[in-house]
Amino acid sequence: MRYAMAIDTNKCVGCADCVVACQTENNVPVGYARDWIAEIVAGTYPNVELEIRSERCNHCDNPPCVRACPTGASHVVEGGIVKVTPEECIGCGACIQSCPYDARFSHPDGYVDKCTFCDHRVKKGQDPACVAVCPTKCMYFGDLDDPSSDVSEAMKNRKYKALAPEAGTDPHIFYLM
Amino acid sequence: MTEELLTSGRMNPNIDPYLNIWHWHIPVYLFLGGLAAGILFFAAYYTITGKEKQMPTTVKWATFIVPAALIIGLIALFLDLKHQMYFWRLYTTVRLESPMSWGAWTLMLITPLSIIWVATYMKEVVPGWQWKWKFLDTAETWIIKNKKGLAWALIVLAVILGIYTGILLSAFNARPLWNVSILGPLFLVSGLSTGAAVIIWMTKNHHERKIMSRIDILLIIIELFLVTHMIMGFLAGSEVKIATAQLFLGGQFTVSFWVFFVILGLVFPLVLETLELRGFKIPVAVPAILILFGGLVFRFIIVEAGQFTRYLY
Ligand code: SF4
Ligand code: SF4
């Protein structure tokens, strides 16, 4: 089992509904975000291209954040989801420094927080909140090892990329192009 | 020409617009760790080689700074933690993949050993010093008899500690400035040099000062070489590495790096120490203070600038 997400950059309009849905679902403190929107404008007018991406922790297969953690608070659970146990975290910031995507932040309560792939929902067979709420249905979630899962289906016959693969993290959020 | 403009909707405190998670605590901790490693290295080295008589400051007096430096460093590290109630979690696991973890364990070993080291010299340093309990006297005699063994343990731990202060940073692939293997040796050499500076400053023995000055000159030359090598490595690297080099070649850290660290903290003391050896009258405190100041500035710059360098936007 390997959870992953595929996001169609051609369908995403950057409405940030996923950001708000996550903040509500996961009680993210005000002013913080576990997911966010990046807009990339490339080229020179009139030949410009716009890419909009909904980003979050990539639940990397080779997660430097887990390796950097001195206490084991950052760990990998079933399906490759990277999580933090607040009661083990000392707030040293090593994992924050080690994430090439800056997907983590220091929760006002002291421990480190980040996207959990909504594993509390996934356990019940639901999609993560961001995926469920997307008005353009541009996000697909599921088990990459299962060829009939939403995410595997979405990636079939499509070109896709991951972010900063040169960082060697083997990220598991894919962007369909 | 193609331009790329990135905007991100993320505004997490201390993460955006640039990372600012580690503040003054970490450079202070790295500086004190390096300094302690430097002094212990020389103390252990001259004990192992049986030169305690010729190098009294190195082996004895200067080591009294070490426990204090290590404890203040640990306090700084503790203050930096954001979930301090759980501090003890550091010592419930050993995670070899995490430099933070084996650094914490190294400090746990080297701090008590350095206190033991200092304790064996209490009687010489404080006239009339008596241990309160008899068993401490027995322990002292036993340790003094096995001083070389203790020195071996300390020299190994000192090298690990010195390199660790650099590896703590260089293990972070996500920060292109830190992610260079040369940072370990560079921090070690810099730590040894600050240690030597303290000894030069403290000693009243002419012969000892001469030896340590020679060593320090060599260390500074190695440091200059490593720094040049590091910048050249960035320039020959990938896009993010080139952007990193620019921070020091016209970017916002140019003045602090070249003026305060390279010129005031390395070249200037190098010249002064060389002149002093040639017989010019120069107060030893001047190059020593400059080296210590340069070492501290260097760590502040590296920690701060490293957090400016990232992969995406
Ligand atoms: S994206 Fe960052 S926080 Fe998430 S698993 Fe990868 S390195 Fe860790
Ligand atoms: S901040 Fe917490 S989760 Fe992150 S490395 Fe330190 S102890 Fe681990």
Image: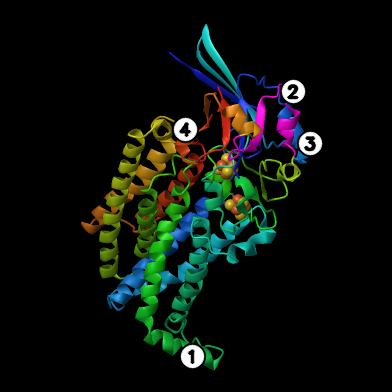
User: Are the residues at dot 4 and dot 3 in contact (C-beta closer than 8 Å)?
Assistant: no
- Residue at 60% x, 45% y is A1
**Which element type, helix, strand or loop, lies under badge 1?**
helix
User: Are the residues at dot 2 and dot 4 in contact (C-beta closer than 8 Å)?
Assistant: no
Q: Is residue A151 visible?
A: yes
For disc 3, the marked residue is A24
Q: Earlier in the sequence, mark 2 or mark 3?
A: 3
Q: Is residue B283 magenta?
A: no
Given this view, does label 4 or label 3 mark the residue nearer the observer?
Answer: 3
Q: CA distance from mark 4 to mark 3?
A: 39 Å
For disc 2, the marked residue is A135
Given this view, does label 2 or label 3 mark the residue nearer the observer?
Answer: 2
Q: Which mark is residue B137?
A: 1
In this picture, is B268 found above or below B99? above
Give neighbour class at mark 2: few <14, some 14-19, many 20+ (Cα, 10 Å).
Answer: some
- The quadrant holding residue B242 is top left
